[in-house]
Image: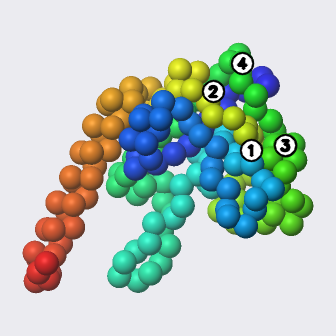
Amino acid sequence: MTVTLYHYTCGHKLQGIAKAEHLAPSAVPPWATHEQGILWFSENPIYEASACKPMMNPATGEKIFNVDLLRDRIGLYRFALGFDVEYDVRKWPQIAAVARIREPQRVTLAVAGMGMGAEPSQWWGSVLACPLELLSLEGLTDDGWTPITMEDALIEFHNKQITVASYSEHKKEISGVTA
């Protein structure tokens, strides 16, 4: 591996990651008992479009996928794995074979990712947990990706939640909706 890889995540996942002190492979669906979970990474240095699922507009039911909105509402973060770190990570589709993902599911994953704007050729993964000590954390700001400590990221996420909750309450007040 000669590139930096990134595990992109959203702010609401940080507390669990901090408590576990590692990134863990994704859970395997109950019907896929033969598969192993994958801890996903991307070589995309801007943003991995398949990382955070879209939010839903409660008024219209419309799915919203807007990086700026996600950044402002819940925070976007990435864990960087340097190319010089000793960790077993494999490129797509090799990681799918290692995780024993059957061909129809591989196609489904790739098509779903491309539908979100992702490039499967940039995907990497591991079936092993990755200790946080091997990674550096960055948060997305107006100025791009900026190094941040886990403690500061957790505070930032908490503050975003207070801001969003306050805004939601304000909207209810001005529209006459009561709780």
Asked if marks 4 and 2 touch (Cβ < 8 Å), the reply is: no
| Amino acid of disc 3 | Val
Q: Quadrant of the C terminus?
A: bottom left
Q: Position of residue 15 (x, y in %)?
A: 38, 41
Label 3: how many residues lie within 10 Å, few (<14), some (14-19) or many (20+)? some
As displayed, is residue 163 above or below residue 76? below
Question: Label 4's element?
Answer: loop
- In primary-sequence order, the first of circles 4 and 3 is 4
Label 2: how many residues lie within 10 Å, few (<14), some (14-19) or many (20+)? many
As displayed, is residue 27 above or below residue 169? above
Q: Position of residue 174 (x, y in %)?
A: 11, 76
| Amino acid of disc 4 | Glu
Is residue 164 found left or right of 79 in the rendered image? Answer: left
Work out how far the residue at label 1 is from the one at label 3, CA to CA, in angstroms: 14 Å
Work out how far the residue at label 4 is from the one at label 2, CA to CA, in angstroms: 10 Å
Q: Position of residue 7 (x, y in %)?
A: 60, 39
Asked if marks 1 and 2 touch (Cβ < 8 Å), the reply is: no
Check disc 3 and report the residue beneath it: 98
Check disc 2 and report the residue beneath it: 81
Q: Residue at x 70, y 48 (%)?
A: 37
- In primary-sequence order, the first of circles 4 and 2 is 2
Asked if marks 2 and 3 touch (Cβ < 8 Å), the reply is: no
**For this rendering, which residue is in front, 70 or 132?**
132
Check disc 4 and report the residue beneath it: 86
